[in-house]
Amino acid sequence: MSVEHQGDENRGTPAITTDEIESLCIVYAVGDGCALDDLAARLGLSPTLAAAMPAAVAPLAAIGLLEVHDGTVCPTLAGREWLRRRLGELGVGRTV
């Protein structure tokens, strides 16, 4: 279930859903690429959740933000552009 978070009208920050926050975190954590087994640790999650990472990455690969090959996950050009654009729009963190 996706929950929409209200934007901050004073800062001009757009609303964002929980699903999008999770997607941003995953694409950001992947960085330039990483072993799928390392993704849970990169997200600050328990290593016991490493087995859940393929299911977390699959929807992002399906829409072209990530690619998975031989146990390695990498952002696509579209994924990098989406991450950069959304972080900029949200005014959050550094842009990559």
Image (cartoon, grey):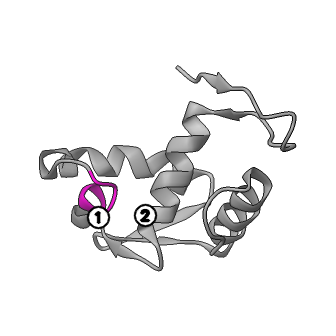
Residue 19, position in %: x, y? 56, 35
Q: Is mark 2 on a helix, strand or loop?
A: helix
Which residue bears the numbered disc 2?
A: 29
Q: Does the magenta stretch include residue 43?
A: yes
How many C-alpha atoms fall within 10 Å of the one at disc 1: few (<14), some, or many (≥20)? many
Q: Which mark is residue 36?
A: 1
Q: Dot 1 lies on which element?
A: helix
Q: For the point 51% across and 60% down, which residue is it?
A: 27
**Which x, y percent locates residue 10?**
87, 37
What residue span does the magenta drawing correspond to? 39-44
Residue 4 colored magenta? no
Graded by Cα atoms within 10 Å as few (under 14), some (14 to 19) or many (20 or more), the crowding at tag 2 reads some
Name the residue at 79% across, 55% down: 89
Residues at discs 2 and 1 in contact (Cβ within 8 Å): no
29 with respect to 1 (left or right): left
- Which amino acid type is marked by label 2? Ala
In the rendered structure, which disc, 2 or 1, sits on the residue that comes first in sequence?
A: 2
The circle on residue 50 is: none
The residue lying at 60 percent from left, 22 percent from top is 3
* For residue 20, side relative to residue 42 (left or right): right
**Image quarter of residue 81:** bottom right
Q: In this view, does 42 lie to the left or right of 74?
A: left
Identify the amino acid type marked 1: Leu
What secondary structure is the stretch in magenta mostly built from? helix
Residue 10 drawn above or below residue 39: above
Q: Quadrant of the C terminus?
A: bottom right
